[in-house]
Image (cartoon, helix red, strand yellow):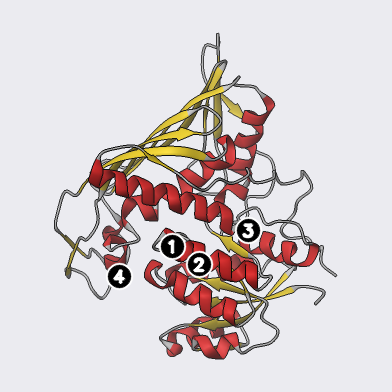
Amino acid sequence: MTGPVGVALVGAGVISKQYLENLSTFPDVRVLGIADLDTARAAAVAAEHGVPASGDLDTILALPEVEIVVNLTIPAAHAEVAMAAITAGKHVYGEKPLAMTTADGAKTLAMAAEGGLLVGSAPDTFLGSGLQSAIQVVESGAIGEPVAAALITRGPGPERWHPSPAFLYQQGAGPLFDIGPYHLTALVAALGPIAQVAGLGRRAQPWRTVGSGPLKDTRFEVEVDTHVIALLDFAAGPSASATFSFDSAAPLVSLEITGTEGVLKLPDPNTFGGPVRAYARGSADWHEVPVKGHVAGRGLGVLDLARAVRTGQPPRASGALGMHVLEAMSAILDSTEHVDFRTLTSTVDRPAALPADWNPCERTLS
């Protein structure tokens, strides 16, 4: 096929609107359908955003013009929906994590490879101007040779604002699998693949209470650790300490890379913009690093995958990257039960930097 790439969304929940708002501004893609278990909800979201088709999964997969399925289902359904799309001959871009287990992630990638199809995986925030600018600082040598990284992402938990948060406390979620992919993907994009990990996990409460929406004051069970501490050893040499927590009354997001000649403060990797700050050896204070490029938002990975489908170039927010991060998180989780280091079996190339003239709002496919 030629011209803009047809895409369809599976999952019409909270995150779908962010994708739709951004994808509608990218001329290299066309949103052709929305599927959901609740077909009435799919129809309502489709009508709101001017999407021509809606229905259940089979209905959307039957649309011949759809080339990429954007999988926005809950984590427990990621692998099942991705495999169904691949079986239907569609490329897949999925929300994080790639799958609930490394076995399902590997099976998804193997099926796609056998069918000559591409897989992309969120998060795509590292394609935003903030993290791209930070990665350029690391690559330039401005902070010297990277030595270590430190990340903290903590807060009281999403049940305060999410209208249906129970799935975020089930297997395949929690702070490690829900928020961890943003930070770990950013670090792999900046420092390369992870070689080994270790972790400790705890959960502060066995039950949580919904804080807003129709389910307000409803209690639900916590199935996963809500406070995870990890050590990461990167193949290129740097190490990192990491804290992922839904148990803190005081929210904090911090991600730093320390080099032999300075320290770099990266932006919140769950965002697409800045700020980026650096501290050079011998300086009196931090200074702002210019942030260049397009901020855009969720959907940059879908666009990058669409352009890869047409050009034959490998996607940056790739299934291989998602698989490597999934294995790292799974190994951290396994280590919390056995209190030892786990060596990863997968590796991945650092994603190629976006070219200076890369513009999501410019049509490049004809």
Find disc 4 in the rendering and name its residue.
164
Mark 3 to mark 4 CA distance (whole Å): 26 Å
Find disc 1 in the rendering and name its residue.
103
Query: Residue at coordinates 55% horizontally, 12% vertically from top-left?
Result: 281
Tag shown at residue 300: 3
Q: Residues within 10 Å of mark 4 (few under 14, many from 20)?
A: some
Q: Amino acid at mark 1?
A: Ala
Q: Residues within 10 Å of mark 3 (few under 14, many from 20)?
A: many
Q: Is label 4 in a helix, a strand or a loop?
A: loop
| Foreground: disc 2 or disc 3 | 2
Q: Earlier in the sequence, mark 1 or mark 4?
A: 1
| Foreground: disc 4 or disc 2 | 2
Q: Quadrant of the C terminus?
A: bottom right
Mark 1 to mark 3 CA distance (whole Å): 27 Å
Find disc 2 in the rendering and name its residue.
107
| Foreground: disc 1 or disc 3 | 1
Q: Is residue 134 left or right of residue 238?
A: right
Q: Is label 1 in a helix, a strand or a loop?
A: helix
Q: Is label 3 in a helix, a strand or a loop?
A: helix
Q: Amino acid at mark 3?
A: Leu
The location of residue 10, given as percent across then percent down, is: 51, 77
Quadrant in the picture for residue 76: bottom left
